[in-house]
Amino acid sequence: MKFAEVRRGGGGLLVGLAGLAVVILAGPLGAQQIGEPEGYRGKPYRAPVPDTLAGAAVVTTETAHRIWESGEARFIDVLPRLPKPAKLPEGTVWRDKPRDSIPGSIWLPNVGYQTIPDLDADYFRRGLEKVTAGDKSEPVVIFCRTDCWMSWNAAKRAIEYGYTDIRWYPDGTDGWRTAGYQLERIEPEHRPE
């Protein structure tokens, strides 16, 4: 049997010629195409995301950094934040997990779930209105972490709210950090009770 070597990332893989046709048709080793769901995506929220979001521009880390440097758009972090458990024993100290994010971003946690209560939807709308000064054509970059459906869902939701210049940054703070860009500690945007 004849063999052909397929290289990826410096390694090699021997496959029979019949298997080579499968590798060629399948594309790069390990690549997977994730399609956009019709609605919002549910659990698991930390999983590979699509390369696209209908109605939004998808930006790379380099593009996100250029946008950030120029100040041409506002950045919204939608990483969820776990609520304080309701039945903690008396005297238990609760510390929220700190969030390091893209400098100047506002953090609107819990707006990227598949379904959100009306209070969270109103919170998200108010946050969007704040960063755009009520102008739905103002550019907004929405992000979370790499492979985080929360940012995809939130960006889709913003589009459905009528925002026309949504930019989705799928690599989020993980991509930002990996590129060597600084992050800063942020607190969630105030949520009226």
Image: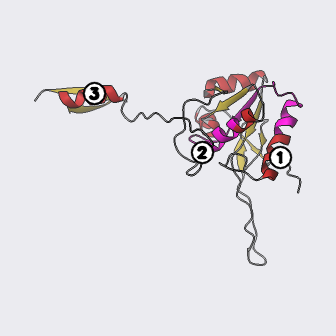
The first of marks 3 and 2 along the sequence is: 3
Q: Position of residue 184 (x, y in %)?
A: 74, 41
Image height of 10 relative to 149, above or below: above
The residue at which mark 1 appears reads as 122
Q: Amino acid under label 3?
A: Val
Q: Are marks 1 and 3 in contact (CB under 8 Å)?
A: no
Image quadrant containing the C terminus: bottom right
Q: Position of residue 124 (x, y in %)?
A: 79, 43
* Residue 17 placement: quadrant: top left
Q: Which mark is residue 2?
A: none
CA separation in Å, label 1 and label 2: 20 Å
The residue at which mark 3 appears reads as 6
The boundaries of the magenta stretch are 127-156
- Relative to 70, is 47 on the left or the right? left
The first of marks 1 and 2 along the sequence is: 2
- Relative to 27, is 116 on the left or the right? right
Q: Is residue 152 magenta?
A: yes
